[in-house]
Image (spheres, rainbow, N blue to C red):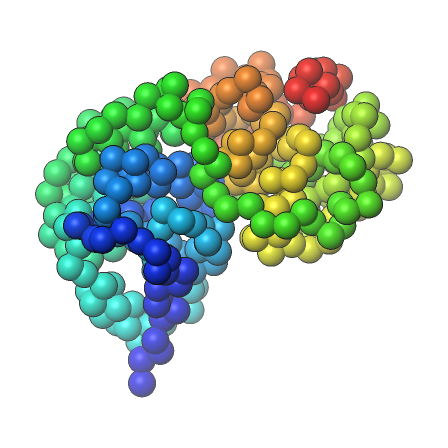
Amino acid sequence: MPQEPPSAAIGYNTAMHSVSERIAIVRLSALGDIINSAVVLQFIRKYRPAARIEWIAEEQFAPILQPNDDLAAVHTVPLKRIKREKNLPLLVATVKKLRSLGPYDLIIDMQGLLKSAVTARLLGKNTHGFDAASAREGIAARFYRRRYSIPYETNIIRRNCDLVGKALGFQIGDEALLDKKPALFLGKRPTFAKAVPHYIAIIVGASWPSKRYPPRRYATLCDLLPYPCFLIWGSEKELEDAKTIAAASENAVVAPSLSLAQLRDAVGYADLTIGGDTGPTHLAWALNRPSVTLYGPTTPRMMFETPRNIAVESDSNVDILHIDKNDMSIKTISPGKIASAAKALL
């Protein structure tokens, strides 16, 4: 028999206003993209106060969205697991589940990939997304009823907000983003940090080696900082790097293994977060907490800079439309430069 995918709604808020329309947001992955997309929810709620807003996400990333007063439900899909296992019965069950979720009055695909566009179309006909020139995969535009031109090189936060605003008929300006409320829920202060009044979260890893700051340079940086540094990791390789940093710095401590919710709280209670261009670092912006984001092969297009969320870049001449994943220039950023930026925020 086909396996039932874990895509039932979770986190329904029974205190929702009376419903006038159902809106589906499709943003399947990755972690950083979901984090940078969640800000739109508060603006949809502002301009559509009676709407029921639902989100479709990859199963492993959905917990970062819960709980959320602006979301009626999160539906999960196991697309990565289907691909990894080549599981046809699970694929059939997932398609059936997606088709059963509607009807939706409006569906917005914020990802612009073929897989997200197909997912959106399975939910209903009134689909909205990027046009072929703007989407990450131009073929995705064929699945939308309404298409919008928002250049790919536009700041990622602005792209998200502009797409949702165009689809729903309102504008989200920079001033509104600077004055936003936290985009994600914050839980309890991490147990590992209860003994210290202040701490800095260091995000050790990233999806690409070229986005990772070298462990030895991180160790030097930690020794320059005024508060204890907790080293946040998410894989065995990152754990090895964290141990290398801690062995070389008297001011660095390896954090325990964290769930997505614990990761969110570790960043949310930190006085400052420092890391490369990766989801855990971007959590700080989403939670209205200070951060220093390090850029080598990418640019601050991937964040919305504020007085408390700043970028420190290498000298690399980055073409955002043709990113060089082998650009290792992040290692040339001096620990002193990062420490100066950090101390200014602290």
**Residue under the point 40% across and 25% down:** 177
Q: Compared with residue 167, is residue 55 higher up or lower down, i.e. above or below?
A: below
- Residue 57, x across and y down, in percent: 37, 54
- Residue 345, x across and y down, in percent: 66, 20
- Residue 180 visible in image: yes
**Residue under the point 35% across and 41% down:** 41
Number of disc labels = 0
Q: Quadrant of the N terminus?
A: bottom left
Q: Quadrant of the C terminus?
A: top right
For residue 99, which quarter of the picture? bottom left
Residue at the extreme bottom of the image, as rendered: 1
- Residue 87, x across and y down, in percent: 36, 72
**Residue under the point 35% across and 64% down:** 9
- Residue 157, x across and y down, in percent: 39, 29
81 on left or right of 22: right
Which sits in the foreground, 58 or 86?
58
79 on left or right of 346: left
Residue at the extreme right of the image, as rendered: 250
